[in-house]
Every structure is written in C-alpha cells, then in structure tokens.
Image (cartoon, rainbow, N blue to C red):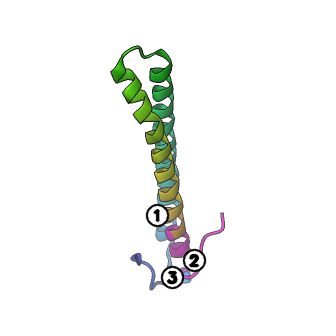
C-alpha cells in the first residue's frame, strides 16, 4: 500500500516531517512491546492454569492460552517489521529500506 509520502524526495522532508517519523517509529516500538507483554501474559496465565487448575474449564483455558500467546507474538512481530519497512521507505524517499 503506497504511503502518503511516496512521491516526495527524501531531501524534501522537513524537520517536522522527520520528527514525526521518529515519533511514529517510537510508537511502533512501544506497540511491539505491548504485543510481547500480552503474549507473555497469555503464556504465564496458560501455564499457571495448566499447572494449578483443577477443573475442566481451567485446563481448557490453559490449553487455549498457550497457542494464543504464540499467535499474538507472531502477529506483533510481523506488524512491527511491516511498519518499520514502510517507515524506512518513507524516510529514504520511497525506494530503499531502512537499515537499523
């Protein structure tokens, strides 16, 4: 999906635009950490339910929480790198990826 600045040369970005890109990159990192935190909560909760749960519902919830933690982690990682690539193309004028 083309971004709003794909037709703008990298030299044409103002200081305000570059600072906005920096803020967006930091927001992307915070969002990634939120996905990791959520995945760890599902993992810990699922393991605790499987270890200490004595009802059938606890075992079912624990069994569901473990694969859900993997899915949340995988989606968060994919989303982080997807946004990072788009920001890199934006910062470097459309053609190249950002090598950080």
- Name the residue that disc number 2 marks: 92
Based on the displayed image, in which of its 4 quarters is residue 85 positioned?
Answer: bottom right
Coordinates of residue 75 in the picture (x, y in percent): 46, 53
Q: Earlier in the sequence, mark 2 or mark 3?
A: 3
Q: Give the SS element for disc 2.
A: loop
* Labelled disc at residue 20: 1
Q: Are marks 1 and 3 in contact (CB under 8 Å)?
A: no
Instruction: Name the quadrant of the N terminus.
Output: bottom left
Q: Earlier in the sequence, mark 1 or mark 3?
A: 3
Q: Give the SS element for disc 1.
A: helix
Residue pushed farthest left? 57
Q: Residue drawn 42% across and 17% down?
A: 53
Mark 2 and mark 3: Cα distance apart in space = 11 Å
Q: Main secondary structure of the magenta part?
A: loop
Q: Is residue 7 above or below residue 46?
A: below
Mark 1 and mark 3: Cα distance apart in space = 14 Å
Residue 23 shows in this picture: no
Coordinates of residue 55 in the picture (x, y in percent): 36, 16
Q: Is residue 7 magenta?
A: no
Q: Earlier in the sequence, mark 1 or mark 2?
A: 1
Residue stretch in magenta: 86-100
Q: Are marks 1 and 2 in contact (CB under 8 Å)?
A: no
Q: Residue drawn 46% across and 63% down?
A: 20
Residue pushed farthest front? 56
Based on the displayed image, in which of its 4 quarters is residue 58 positioned?
Answer: top left
Q: Is residue 25 above or below residue 67?
A: below
Instruction: Name the quadrant of the C terminus.
Output: bottom right
- Name the residue that disc number 3 marks: 12
Which label sits in the foreground, 2 or 3?
Answer: 2
Q: Is residue 96 above or below residue 61?
A: below
């Amino acid at each position: 999906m083309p971004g709003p600045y794909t037709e703008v040369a990298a030299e044409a970005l103002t200081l305000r635009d570059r600072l906005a890109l920096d803020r967006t990159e930091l927001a992307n990192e915070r969002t990634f950490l939120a996905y990791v935190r959520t995945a760890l909560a599902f993992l810990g909760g699922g393991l605790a339910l499987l270890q200490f749960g004595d009802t059938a519902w606890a075992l079912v919830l624990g069994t569901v929480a473990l694969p859900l933690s993997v899915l949340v982690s995988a989606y968060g990682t994919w989303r982080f790198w997807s946004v990072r690539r788009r920001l890199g193309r934006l910062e470097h004028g459309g053609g190249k990826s950002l090598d950080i």
